[in-house]
Image: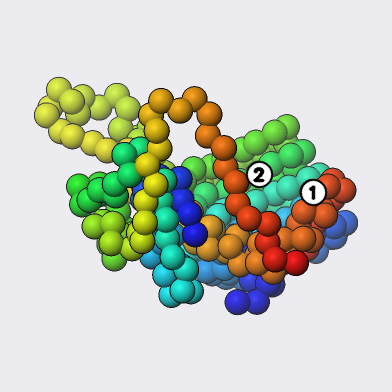
């Protein structure tokens, strides 16, 4: 499952779906998932250390357009 | 995860002249009471607790009266939309993390004898000289993470189950109000 960004909503969603066997990828500005231990979150939720993200993709700051594509679902 | 649990109480279509009383609805994923197009329905002493969306939500041409309502721990306390005509009396809204009261579109609503214990935003601290007093405050960042994630999770399941049906509905401009959605 891919996320735009690595904010609180993405991290909490990643936490919920991890038991479904899905890998988590995030598109971030610099290709890194940073610690968010100083941002408020409900206790025992989210992923403050960013450990649930399997891979990241860097978003080129110079890009003016972003195309989103995904494979067609199997019929 | 049964589809019927998307809303605790769903009333869609031309239901009329009904009285629902002494009902507590808790912890499905969408609204506690999701009401659309019903007419002259009365709810007495109802509660919606820990929902991912609205405690009660009116849609379409909906006309109902609520006498005694507690909305606790939901995303939105009350959210009325479209051309709904609603009336609430003896209302308690507590610990709702989005809007406490959220009114959209062109409907009419009255609320009387209401108590709102707001945690929905920062407007309650406007006018307080917090900065001058050296007190740091924050917005609601982080509060929405859990309900939004649960919503994402449910949509993931819905897409897996009903993607083609949802696409067909979109192409044909069909607003499917069945419990599955």
Task: Give left or right: position of B123 versus B77.
Answer: left
Residue at 41% over, 51% down:
A26
Q: At 57% from the left edge and 53% from the top edge, which residue is drawn? A: B54
Residue B26 visible? The answer is yes
The local secondary structure at tag 2 comes to strand
Q: Residue at x 70, y 33 (%)?
A: B105
Residue B156 appears at what percent x and percent y? 58, 62
| Residue plotted at (45% across, 28% down) | A63
Front residue of B26 and B52: B52
Provide residue B92's location: percent of width, then percent of height: 49, 53
Report which quarter residue B128 is drawn in: top left
Side of A37 relative to B148 (left or right): left
Nearer to me, B156 or B15: B156
Q: Chain of mark 1?
A: B
Q: Which disc number belongs to residue B80?
A: 2
Is the C terminus of chain A in the top left, top right, bottom left or bottom right quadrant? Answer: bottom right
Q: Quickly name the residue at label 1.
A: B170
Q: Nearer the viewer, mark 1 or mark 2?
A: 1
Q: Earlier in the sequence, mark 1 or mark 2?
A: 2
* Crowd around label 1: few <14 · some 14–19 · many ≥20 (10 Å): few
């Amino acid at each position: 499952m891919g996320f735009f960004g690595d904010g609180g909503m993405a991290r909490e969603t990643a936490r919920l779906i991890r038991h479904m066997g899905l890998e988590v990828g995030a598109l971030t500005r610099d290709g890194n998932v940073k610690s968010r231990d100083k941002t408020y979150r409900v206790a025992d939720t989210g992923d403050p250390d960013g450990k649930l993200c399997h891979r990241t993709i860097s978003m080129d700051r110079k890009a003016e357009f972003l195309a989103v594509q995904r494979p067609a679902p199997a019929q | 995860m049964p589809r019927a649990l998307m809303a605790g109480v769903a009333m869609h279509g031309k239901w009329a002249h009904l009285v629902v009383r002494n009902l507590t609805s808790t912890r499905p994923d969408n609204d506690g009471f999701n009401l659309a197009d019903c007419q002259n329905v009365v709810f007495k002493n109802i509660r919606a607790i820990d929902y991912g969306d609205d405690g009660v939500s009116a849609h379409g041409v909906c006309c109902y009266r609520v006498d005694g309502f507690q909305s606790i721990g939901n995303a939105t306390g009350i959210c009325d939309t479209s051309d709904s005509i609603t009336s609430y009396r003896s209302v308690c809204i507590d610990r709702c993390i989005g809007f406490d009261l959220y009114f959209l579109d062109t409907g009419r609503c009255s609320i009387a004898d209401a108590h709102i214990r707001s945690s929905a935003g920062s407007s309650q601290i406007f006018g307080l000289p917090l900065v001058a007093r050296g007190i740091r405050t924050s917005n609601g960042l982080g509060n929405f993470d859990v309900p939004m994630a649960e919503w994402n999770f449910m949509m993931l399941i819905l897409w897996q189950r009903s993607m083609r049906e949802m696409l067909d509905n979109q192409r044909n401009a069909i607003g499917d109000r069945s419990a599955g959605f």
